[in-house]
């Protein structure tokens, strides 16, 4: 696959992708294996995955939640509900940037009450997005338990938050960015580790 | 510099679509048990109503409260305005209280524009005289989009007292921005002088356009603003320009009937039409809260406004 054969790519992804200094730390098969392992861990930890509801955090967390739901169905042979969560209105940095467009929040009809909610996101960094997600869950209902699954944990937490399921622990410095590319969003699967772009707005989560 | 929403023309196509998309997300909140978001915590929104209003004021108040803003209601009756305080002095008082957003309804066209030059916060026009009412146009467009999908190329017919209607002007401007074709239908006496400069077509014959309309919006006959005889009798107006069951039957299968309220049942719209399944009148009120939440969030939610227009002093 080369970049020229894929039109219609989001600008941010093209920049990160096209930057020769960024290198792929996970490729497509690695991501698939990590998700399969997380699926097994979820089943193990929740004793068969009953009452599990996967909630992906916009935008790439949603894609990962959908894939995880697929992996769980393959292993257990029955469908696992999943949905999406947009945490924009709950972010603590809302007033530091212009008002942003909202993503979609879609819950299965049965809601979150008494479910074991597994939040799914691509990169765990400061933990602030997860805090916002916990706050928004609070307004949506009362889950029995909330767990967190991430594809990459890059460290540098600013809040007392940790993940229950981690695809890969990736020690990074603050001068690096981690960018997750997914086929559905970006046209290819990869986790890229690169230098901070000169444009300060382009940093990863 | 702060941005304001004073005219529907302040919104570009992208802005308008951003408001409608945001409103659609925010509409979900209405179905939840906790109808509240923390987004505007600590921000103050002042509702400044110099003219009577029920639904618009309540709608703005509900919208601001669902976003956790502090709301201060101010109506001209029972305030210093009845002692003769000017708009500017009232504005300076608000300024001293630190209002982040000011929602204003005023009987004089242009009052929100003047206010925007005097205060630091963002001004939202909630109806000024016979000029504009942009959030009504947004909630109308939102209602149409929910029922009919994309508005590009849709035929919208607005019928009645266009001369005194701020709703008509804002709707024509916004719908034109969104790519819909608008036709105004009214007796010649109830059309403004410069109607040929508006981006819409005009007809005097309601029956001729019914079968080609996706949306028909009836305007209220504004008796309180009429100081001359614009039509011979209410009955004659109603017969030529009122929407009754017979006329509704000529509309295409999918067409919807709208009215910004308050209605004069039996004058511009028959009771059976207002209560029919095609009528979106109650829906429009519910959608008003979502549309206004979107406007308040996009104006006040971030470090700077995402929509609207600056006003120079």
Image (spheres, grey):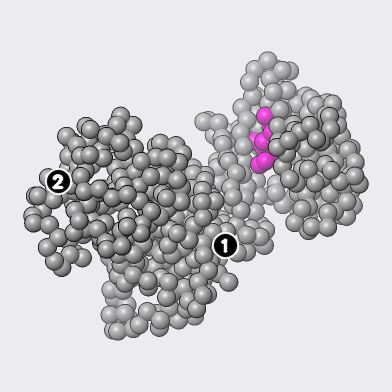
Residue A63 located within the stretch drawn in magenta: yes
Front residue of B128/B229: it is B229
Q: Which residue is mark 2?
A: B240
Q: Position of residue B2 (x, y in %)?
A: 55, 69
Residue A166 appears in the rendering: no
Q: Position of residue A114 (x, y in %)?
A: 58, 33
Element type where label 2 sits in the image = helix
In the rendered structure, find residue B305 and report the number of the disc placed on it: 1
Q: Chain of mark 2?
A: B
- Magenta residues span A55-66
- Look at the image and tell me in which quarter the N terminus of chain A lies: top right
Seen at 22% across and 52% down, the residue is: B186
Element type where label 1 sits in the image = loop
Is residue B85 shown left or right of residue B36? left
Q: Chain of mark 1?
A: B
Q: How many marks?
A: 2
Q: Position of residue B310 (x, y in %)?
A: 53, 68
Q: Position of residue B267 (x, y in %)?
A: 15, 49
Front residue of A187/A64: it is A187
Label 2 vs label 1, nearer the camera: 2
Residue A76 located within the stretch drawn in magenta: no
Is residue A122 shown left or right of residue B194? right
């Amino acid at each position: 696959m080369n970049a020229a054969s894929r039109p219609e790519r989001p600008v941010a992804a093209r920049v990160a992708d096209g930057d020769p200094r960024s290198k792929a730390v996970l490729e497509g098969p690695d991501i698939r294996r990590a998700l399969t392992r997380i699926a097994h861990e979820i089943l193990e930890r929740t004793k068969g995955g009953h009452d599990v509801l996967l909630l992906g955090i916009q935008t790439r967390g949603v894609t990962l939640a959908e894939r995880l739901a697929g992996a769980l169905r393959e292993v257990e042979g029955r469908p696992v509900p999943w949905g999406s969560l947009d945490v924009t209105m709950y972010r603590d940095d809302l007033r530091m940037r212009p008002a942003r467009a909202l993503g979609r929040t879609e819950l299965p009809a049965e809601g979150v009450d008494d479910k074991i909610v597994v939040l799914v996101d691509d990169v765990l960094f400061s933990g602030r997005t997860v805090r916002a997600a916990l706050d928004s869950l609070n307004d949506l209902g009362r889950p029995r338990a909330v767990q967190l699954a991430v594809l990459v944990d890059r460290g540098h937490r600013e809040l007392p938050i940790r993940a229950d399921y981690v695809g890969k622990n990736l020690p990074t410095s603050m001068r690096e960015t981690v960018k997750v590319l997914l086929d559905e969003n970006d046209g290819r699967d990869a986790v890229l580790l690169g230098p901070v772009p000169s444009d300060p707005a382009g940093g990863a989560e | 510099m702060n941005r304001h929403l004073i005219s529907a023309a302040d919104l570009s196509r992208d802005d308008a679509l951003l408001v409608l998309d945001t409103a659609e997300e925010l509409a979900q909140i209405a179905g939840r048990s906790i109808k509240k978001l923390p987004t505007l915590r600590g921000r103050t929104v002042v509702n400044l109503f110099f003219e009577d209003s029920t639904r618009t004021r309540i709608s703005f108040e509900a919208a601001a409260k669902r976003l956790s803003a502090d709301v201060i209601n101010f109506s001209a009756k029972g305030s210093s305005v009845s002692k003769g305080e000017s708009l500017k002095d009232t504005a300076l008082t608000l300024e001293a209280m630190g209002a982040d957003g000011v929602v204003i309804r005023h009987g004089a066209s242009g009052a929100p524009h003047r206010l925007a030059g005097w205060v630091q916060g963002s001004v939202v026009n909630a109806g000024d005289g016979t000029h504009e009412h942009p959030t009504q146009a947004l909630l109308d467009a939102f209602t149409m989009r929910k029922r009919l999908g994309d508005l590009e190329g849709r035929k919208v017919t607005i019928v009645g007292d266009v001369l005194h209607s701020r709703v008509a002007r804002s709707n024509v401007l916004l719908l034109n921005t969104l790519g819909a074709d608008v036709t105004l239908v009214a007796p010649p006496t109830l059309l403004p002088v410069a109607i040929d400069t508006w981006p819409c077509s005009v007809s005097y014959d309601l029956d001729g356009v019914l079968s080609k309309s996706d949306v028909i919006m009836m305007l209220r006959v504004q008796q309180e603003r009429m100081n001359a005889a614009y039509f011979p009798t209410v009955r004659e107006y109603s017969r030529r320009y009122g929407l009754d069951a017979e006329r509704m039957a000529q509309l295409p299968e999918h067409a919807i009937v709208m009215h910004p309220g308050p209605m004069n049942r039996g004058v511009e719209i028959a009771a059976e039409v207002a209560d029919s399944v095609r009528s979106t009148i109650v829906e429009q009120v519910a959608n008003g809260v979502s549309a206004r939440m979107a406007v308040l969030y996009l104006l006040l939610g971030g470090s700077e406004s995402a929509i609207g227009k600056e006003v120079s002093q």
